[in-house]
Image: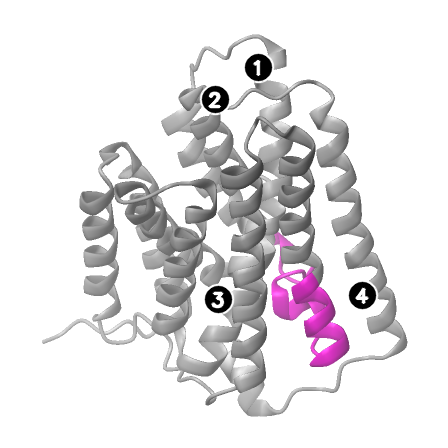
Amino acid sequence: MATTVTSSRTRALLWTGWVSLGLLLLPIGNGPLYLAAVAGSALILALVPGAIPGRSGGGHDALDLAVIAALYVSVVALNSTAFLVFTVDHVAGLFLCFAAALVLGVAGPMVYTVRVRHRPLGDLGLRRDNLRSAGGLALVFGGVQFALTLWGYDLPAPVDWVPLLVMALVVGVFESVFFRGFVQTRLEAQYGTIAGVAGAAVLYGAYHVGFGMTGADLLFLTALGVVYAAAFALARNLVVLWPLLTPMGSFYANVEAGDIELPWASIAGFVDVLGLMVLSWWLMQRYQRRHPAPTPDRAEVLRHA
């Protein structure tokens, strides 16, 4: 008789274990192999009856898709201009384009969600009602990531890693809000969990072409995107990803590669970017208090449960 997963607690435990496994498989390194391992194991688990809550998408939403496409193309174009056109030979242009991509990827979804669609910021995973459970998952996943990467790692001189850590934290805010809180949530609302997770992961992997990455690297990042998307789907709170899981992975990868050199002064620039992100959140939080989002109907609640 086929095993059926009927309890939400059992589902959570299964997928928590799977996300941990996906992180433990990171040392595979090989992009195609890692993607096959992640996608294959996720599909096997998804095929277990009841492993994924019985949710289907709510139908085609042309405006959501148009905004996702417009913001995605803009972010990739700005990153491509920064890293492939200006390059490190023109630091000012590189940073301004990179910063613009980061701010757009956070402020854009917030403004669209709150001002245009009249949805709450919680729809993006910016919520406080389940901090305890989300924080617990964050500690589990962050602990696995730390054990694999930074435990016993001999860091270089502070000037060679502190600016990289600040950059990883700021970029982590962008990636969490844009790819998980916005793209994944909206795709899931339309096409269901599996399609939403897969679509967000593919877009996450492909967006790295703006940094000049190709081939196996994109496949590896797509697989990692599946892992991050599953982690977010468990909690529906960005705390599960930031500030531990995604920044830690990015930080370690940059330190290990050793191909990015940032001066102390770059910290001020990234703090400014973070400040603009926080300002966007504060303004939308203020607007939301003055113009409360309408209470969603029961079907909408079930789709996001």
Q: Which residue corresponds to the image point at 58% horizontal and 91% vertical from the top-left?
A: 298
Check disc 1 and give the amino acid type.
Asp
Look at the image and give the residue range highlighted in magenta: 108-133
Residue to which mark 1 is pinned: 160
For the N terminus, which image quadrant? Answer: bottom left
- Residue behind mark 3: 184
Q: Left or right of 113: which side holds 283?
A: right
Main SS of residues in magenta: helix
Residue with the most extreme left position = 1
- Amino acid type, mark 3: Gln
Query: Marks 4 and 2, how far apart in space?
Result: 35 Å
Q: Which residue is mark 2?
A: 255
Confirm whether residue 237 shows in the render: no
Distance from the alpha carbon under mark 3 to that under mark 4 = 20 Å
Instruction: Check disc 2 and report its element: helix, strand or loop.
Output: helix
Q: CA distance from mark 2 to mark 3?
A: 29 Å
Q: Which mark is residue 284?
A: 4
Check disc 2 and give the amino acid type: Val
**For discs 3 and 1, the disc positioned in front in the rendered view:** 1
Answer whether residue 216 is visible to the viewer in this image: yes
Seen at 31% across and 50% down, the residue is 223
